[in-house]
Amino acid sequence: MVAVLSMSKQEFSRLEVLLRVQSGGLGVTDACVLIGLKRRQVFRLLRGLKQDGAASLLSKRRGRPSNHRLPAEVRTLALSIVRERYSDFGPSLAAEKLAEHHGCSVSRETLRSWMIADGLWQDRRHRLPSPHQPRRRRDCLGELVQIDGSEHAWFEDRGPPCTLLAFVDDATSRLMQLRFVTFDIICANSPQAKGRIERAFGTLQDRMVKELRLAGVSSITAANAWLPGFITAYNTRFGRDPANAKNLHRPLAQADDLDEILAWREERTVTHNLTLHYDRMMLLLDPTPLARGLARKKVEVVNYPDGRFAVQFNGTALDFKVFDKIQTVPPGAIVDNKRLSAVLEQIKAQQAAYPAHQQRGHMARRRPPNNLEAPGLPSKGRAPRHGAAAAAA
């Protein structure tokens, strides 16, 4: 019978080198370099290989528990606590809680291996992938409209990149509205949640770019005037009938106020001094009888699309004034990568509007060269010598 030995990669590499030394194909000095051992240790391995064969290269501690292994009682205690109180915790958080609340200090990786062996945790390699199942379309037109923006070179090399805002109906795949803008004001980072509109952008970035080229459109203003005809042709080609013919859009009622509907609202707590903070400002409420009763209560700061803002309590506007606006220069706002190119273009345009002597790198700001840097050219503040001599002659 042939004995089968289980060897590690390091042990197998040593065996290969030692066999070459035995056959005379490799010197001991070279073997020391390959194995990373001293000559005395290499000779010891050669003696063991000659006497006991390849089995002499196996680690003598194989199959034996580590000297640093924690006692079995610690493992039992830790797993019992995890099973009782932290069954849905991950190994990292569970190890923190064991040390913090139970005085049981176990490393994260040790606890991970114990939990996997005991069936309390499943490592990432053996987890089933999260399914992304298709979602049925909505039944009615207007039931769900997906909105997103796509920054792209819509005009190719005829104009700068810009953003196309699109409104797509989920039930019919129809384009409800398209508009070109300079900035991408809708910065969404979850395309999986908007498959319908992402697929629409894939089609638009192919077809619309070519249609704009054929129409000779190269500016945002001209493109927005051109869009209605494209929307009609697109919906005729790619739109579909809804499952339910009912249209869930409704006309605006007389009581509907779009400014109030489209406003951004944030809650703030009124202090005992009838003040609140909003957008790096301190707002002072006028001490009316209504405002006096709002100390430590929540009010709404309403930011309207046209830039106005108001303070309201249960729909009632409160009079206020701005007490202090911080006059320090704020650090630059973090700009989403989708908006970066448009912001840079705006900064470039602002810098170009400065006078020439205030623009960084402009020719008007450069120091005139001296005679050492450029012989023969005029130095700063005086005419060249040969020019003065020529004038005197």
Image (cartoon, helix red, strand yellow):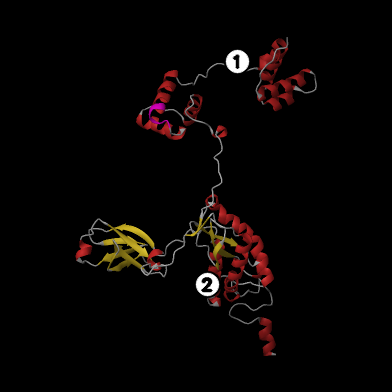
Q: Does the magenta stretch include residue 84?
A: yes
How many numbered discs, if any? 2
Query: Predominant secondary structure in magenta?
Result: helix
Secondary structure of the residue carrying tag 2 is: helix
Reply above or below: 186 against 129.
below
Mark 2 highlights which residue? Answer: 350
Q: Which amino acid does label 1 sit on?
A: Lys
Q: Which label's residue is closer to the chain start, 1 or 2?
A: 1
Residue at x-position 46% and y-position 34%: 90
- Residue 383: x, y in percent? 63, 82
Secondary structure of the residue carrying tag 1 is: loop
Disc sitting over residue 289 in the figure: none
Whether residue 160 is visible here, answered yes or no, is no
- Residue 331: x, y in percent? 44, 61
Q: Which of 162 and 370 is in front in this view?
A: 162
- Residue 337: x, y in percent? 54, 57
**Quadrant of image for the N terminus:** top right
* Image quadrant in which you'd find residue 366: bottom right
Residue extending farthest to the bottom is 393
In the image, which residues are magenta? 83-87
Q: Is residue 222 left or right of residue 248?
A: right
Disc sitting over residue 60 in the figure: 1
Q: What residue type is labelled 2?
A: Gln
- The 10 Å Cα crowd at callout 2, few under 14, some 14 to 19, many 20 or more, is few
- The 10 Å Cα crowd at callout 1, few under 14, some 14 to 19, many 20 or more, is few
Residue at x-position 71% and y-position 27%: 34
